[in-house]
Structures are given as structure tokens and as C-alpha cells.
């Protein structure tokens, strides 16, 4: 057996053993069913589900129908071996949302709108977490501001309290706080699933990162859709 074939089969077996142990108490289950069960519970498996189905087919050919007239008929290419090894590494050590750690600019409900607008302009950001009594209650964005503008005859941001802007918004609380230890794949699934929550056909405005995912903790980062899009599975 070639070196590529050995590496591919070894890595596939590591993945299968890991999934069987974690999602089926170590008992045997057909690999396809195992992937379906695991992908319902873990974002990283769902992200690479189609690859794993394909590699399962390749494994079956290699193990059960590997030779014709003594010649190997299925030989994994270098990039296939590299990819399955990369998938195995992500399964073991998935990237965490801590990669999005950054300074978060926020306002309080009794701050003036002009403060939030200054942050948006100066730091080129579109989402501003809003805090009331030590808890993140919303994420202010351009949609909130547009709703407020549409309802007012005259506007003076320096005299308008952010709480009043939010009270006129058509859509509030369209965000979620998540733990800094969450994988980017699980965070991407939260974003993807938010599209089907009321209001339907509208993704979360943001995911706000705190140490353990509680809204009364210090914010350590914020994720918007463009940040996480590449991790969202089909």
C-alpha cells in the first residue's frame, strides 16, 4: 500500500473512531448515519459533512475493491490526503470565536445618538452594543436609525437618547451573546439558523462575545455576518 493510501486510511479511521466514541458511546454505527447524527450536534462536522461522505465512499473502494488484477484502482491524491488531515485537525481543535477578539465600542441607553454615530464614523463599524443596568439589551445599527428617522419630522442626534431610537425600531433584540470558547463553526450555525427565526429571512445583526456567553459580562468581541460567512455550511 502506498504512503498516501496509508495516511488517508489512518486519518479516516481516527475520525471514525472519534465520532463513534463521542456521538454513539463507542458502539458501531454505519459511517453515513454517524455523520448525520454528529452534524446535528456539532458545527464542524456539519461544515465538512459532504467531504466526509465522499471520503467514506473512497475508503470503501480502497478497502473492499482496492485491486483489479493485483493493481490498486483507488489512490488518494496529495490534496485529498492534505484535506482529510486538515479536517481531522479541525475536528480535534476547531477554531474558536476568540479569533474575533477586539475592542468593542458600546453605548448606554441614556447616551445621545450622536455618540453612537461618532463611533460608527470614526471606527468604520456598523453595530453598537447598547447597555442598560450592566446588561447588553440590544445592538444599535443603521436599520434602527432609519426607523427613527422615518418617524420624526425633525432630527437632532445630539439631543436624541439612544433608548428613544430603539423604542421606535421595527426590529429589536436581533442578536445573541456567545461564549468566547465557542467554535466558529457552531457560531456560524447560530447565524445560519437565525435566518429562520422571526423576523424570518433576516440574519442576526451581530453575535456579541463574552467570556461565558452571558449578557452581563464584559464584551471581548463582536461578529457580524461578513466575518462568519465563510464558515456557514450549505
Image (cartoon, helix red, strand yellow):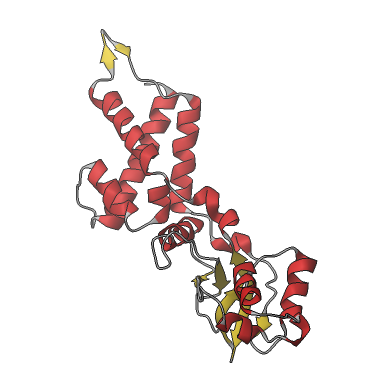
Q: Quadrant of residue 225?
A: bottom right
**Residue 218 appears at what percent x and percent y?**
61, 80
Furthest-bottom residue in this view: 133
Residue 119 is at least partly visible in this image: yes
123 over 31 or under it: above or below: below
Residue 105, by quadrant, is: bottom right
Seen as rendered, the residue at the extreme top is: 69
Of 158 and 21, the residue lying toward us: 158
Farthest residue in the right direction?
Answer: 122
Q: Nearer the viewer, residue 54 or 147?
A: 147
Q: Is residue 201 above or below residue 9?
A: below
Image quadrant where residue 111 sits: bottom right
Q: Where does the image place residue 166, in percent across and percent down from the top left?
A: 58, 81
> Could you say where residue 132 lies in the image, as x and y percent from the top left?
59, 88
- Does 70 appear above or below 153? above
The percent coordinates of residue 205 (x first, y second) are 55, 66
| Residue 217 in sight | no
Residue at position x 46%, y 23% in the image? 77
The residue depicted at 44 percent of the width and 48 percent of the height is 233
Q: Which quarter of the rendered picture does the N terminus lie within? A: top left
Q: Could you tell whether 127 is left or right of 79 in the image?
A: right
The correct choice, above or below, for 73 with respect to 11 in the image is: above
Which quarter of the image is occupied by the C terminus?
Answer: top left
**Could you tell me how many numbered marks the image carries?**
0
The residue at the point 56 percent across, 71 percent down is: 208
Amino acid at each position: 500500500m502506498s504512503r498516501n493510501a496509508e495516511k488517508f486510511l489512518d486519518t479516516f479511521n481516527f475520525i471514525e473512531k472519534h465520532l463513534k466514541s463521542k456521538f454513539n458511546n463507542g458502539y458501531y454505527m454505519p459511517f453515513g448515519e454517524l455523520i448525520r447524527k454528529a452534524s446535528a450536534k456539532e458545527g464542524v462536522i456539519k461544515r465538512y459533512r459532504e467531504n466526509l461522505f465522499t471520503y467514506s465512499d473512497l475508503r470503501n473502494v480502497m478497502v473492499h475493491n482496492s485491486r483489479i488484477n493485483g493493481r490498486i484502482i483507488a489512490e488518494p491524491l496529495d490534496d485529498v490526503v492534505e484535506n482529510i488531515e486538515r479536517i481531522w485537525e479541525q475536528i480535534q481543535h476547531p477554531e474558536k470565536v476568540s479569533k474575533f477578539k477586539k475592542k468593542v465600542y458600546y453605548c448606554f441607553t441614556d447616551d445621545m445618538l450622536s455618540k453612537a454615530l461618532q463611533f460608527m464614523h470614526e471606527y468604520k463599524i456598523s453595530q453598537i452594543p447598547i447597555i442598560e443596568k450592566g446588561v447588553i439589551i440590544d445592538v444599535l445599527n443603521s436599520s434602527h436609525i432609519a426607523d427613527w428617522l422615518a418617524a420624526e419630522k425633525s432630527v437632532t442626534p445630539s439631543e436624541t437618547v439612544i433608548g428613544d431610537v430603539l423604542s421606535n425600531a421595527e426590529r429589536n433584540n436581533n442578536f445573541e451573546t456567545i461564549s468566547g470558547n465557542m467554535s466558529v463553526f457552531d457560531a456560524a450555525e447560530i447565524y445560519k439558523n437565525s435566518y429562520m427565526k422571526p423576523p424570518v429571512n433576516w440574519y442576526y445583526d451581530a453575535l456579541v462575545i463574552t467570556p461565558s456567553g452571558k449578557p452581563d459580562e464584559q464584551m471581548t468581541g463582536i461578529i457580524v455576518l461578513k466575518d462568519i460567512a465563510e464558515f456557514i455550511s450549505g
